[in-house]
Image: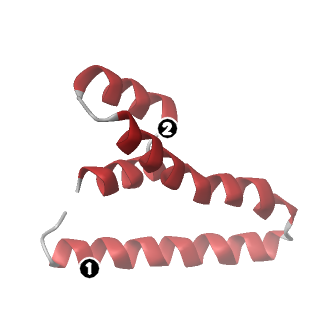
C-alpha cells in the first residue's frame, strides 16, 4: 500500500517536496522509493516531452480525458472508502 501511495503522490506533488518529506520523515527502503519514483514520474515525463508537439485542439482533448479518468478513479476509490 505504501508503494502505490508514493506512486500516486509522485503524480500530484512536486518531486522535490515529496523527496525531502520521505527522506526526513520515513524509513522507506531505497528499492521501494526507487521503483515508486520511476513509475510515478514516467507518465508525466512522457506527456510533457511529447504532447507539446501536438496541435492545441488535441492537447485540450487529452487534458479533459485525463481529468475525467482521474475524477472517476477518485470517485470510485472514495465510494469504496479507500480514500
Query: Which quarter of the image is occupied by the C terminus?
Result: bottom left
Query: Which quarter of the image is occupied by the N terminus?
Result: bottom left
From what the image shows, is residue 21 above or below residue 1? above
In the visual, does 50 lie left or right of 20? right
The residue at 24%/24% (across/down) is 25
Relative image position of residue 17 (x, y in whole percent)? 43, 29
The residue at 39%/73% (across/down) is 71
**Is disc 1 placed on a helix, strand or loop?**
helix
Residue 48: quadrant of the picture: bottom right
In the rendered image, the residue lying farthest to the left is 81
Mark 1 neighbour class, 10 Å CA radius: few under 14, some 14 to 19, many 20 or more: few
Q: Which mark, by number, is residue 14?
A: 2
In the visual, does 75 lie left or right of 10? left
The residue tagged 1 is: 76
From what the image shows, is residue 37 above or below residue 70? above
Relative image position of residue 27 (x, y in whole percent)? 23, 29
Mark 2 or mark 1: name the one nearer the start of the chain. Answer: 2
From what the image shows, is residue 26 above or below residue 76? above
Amino acid at each position: 500500500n505504501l508503494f502505490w501511495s508514493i506512486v500516486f503522490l509522485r503524480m500530484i506533488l512536486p518531486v522535490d517536496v515529496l523527496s525531502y518529506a520521505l527522506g526526513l520523515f520515513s524509513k522507506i527502503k531505497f528499492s521501494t522509493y526507487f521503483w515508486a519514483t520511476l513509475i510515478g514520474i514516467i507518465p508525466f515525463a512522457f506527456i510533457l516531452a511529447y504532447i507539446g508537439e501536438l496541435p492545441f485542439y488535441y492537447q485540450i482533448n487529452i487534458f479533459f480525458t485525463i481529468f475525467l479518468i482521474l475524477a472517476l478513479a477518485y470517485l470510485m476509490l472514495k465510494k469504496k472508502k479507500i480514500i
